[in-house]
Image: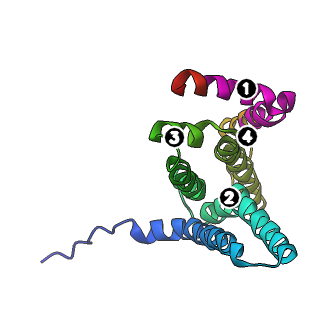
Amino acid sequence: MTNEATPQLPWPSLKKVFMPALVAVIIWLVLHITYDLLGFIENVSLYRTLASIVWIMLVLSVGFSSIVIYPVVYFRGASVRLRILAVYMLPLAWCIKEFIRVSSDVTAGQALFYVLFTSVQLLIVIGQIAVIGLSELFCRAWDKRRGASKPIFTLAPVLASVLSLISLYFILLYNGGYAFHLTVKMIYRSLFL
């Protein structure tokens, strides 16, 4: 009887890759629930202080958790696809939460439009592309210092970072964000009104 190796499922490696993203999602959920529960505080000054602190932590967790997640999963040996998927778990959770929140007042199509095309959502989704590109360059530079032979600068991470930053400029800064807002508003009107 031969001793054939049983094929291993990828779950242990997936667990290793997605655990940082899952921790980020759990932290975000705790912050979100905490923010909602702060409404019970009757002292206005205390409420405003705590709400501001928790809100800042919420924004940082959604917008910048990938700064931590990407390098962690990179150095755990995840493929590029798994690293990107791990980075987008928290923004996806945010978008799902926003879809549920908005869809209670508008149609599913309007809620989906809101989740996909408003500036806050796009800042989160497109901003992650810049963070991924810059994190990839950072991780490669770190690997290079440790003796790795692969190049630091390649087309994909540099292009991703540059195009994402250009997109963010037009969404947020060009004409004070007014041009983008007006364009989205016109598209919304033509689709739903």
Q: Which residues are magenta?
A: 164-187
Which of the 4 image quadrants contains residue 178? top right
Looking at the image, which residue is at 55% across and 58% down? 93
Residue 141 against residue 73 in the figure, above or below: above
Left or right of residue 48: residue 113: left
Looking at the image, which residue is at 67% across and 44% down? 129
Q: Nearer the viewer, mark 2 or mark 3?
A: 3
1 and 4 marks in contact (CB < 8 Å) = no
The answer to whether residue 190 of the structure is visible from this angle is yes
50 and 86: which is toward the camera: 50
Type of the residue with mark 4: Ser
Query: What is the distance, in whole Å, between disc 3 and disc 1 at their CAs?
Result: 18 Å
Q: Horizontal and vertical percent for residue 164?
A: 72, 37
Q: Which residue is mark 2?
A: 62
Q: Nearer the viewer, mark 4 or mark 2?
A: 2
- Label 2 element class: helix
Query: What is the distance, in whole Å, between disc 1 and disc 4 at their CAs?
Result: 26 Å
- Label 3 element class: helix
Which of the 4 image quadrants contains residue 83? bottom right
Badge number at residue 112 = 3
Q: Nearer the viewer, mark 1 or mark 2?
A: 1
Q: Horizontal and vertical percent for residue 64?
A: 73, 57
Query: What is the distance, in whole Å, between disc 4 and disc 3 at their CAs?
Result: 26 Å
Type of the residue with mark 2: Val
* Quadrant of the snapshot with the C terminus: top right
Q: Which residue is mark 1?
A: 182
76 and 146: which is toward the camera: 76
Type of the residue with mark 3: Leu
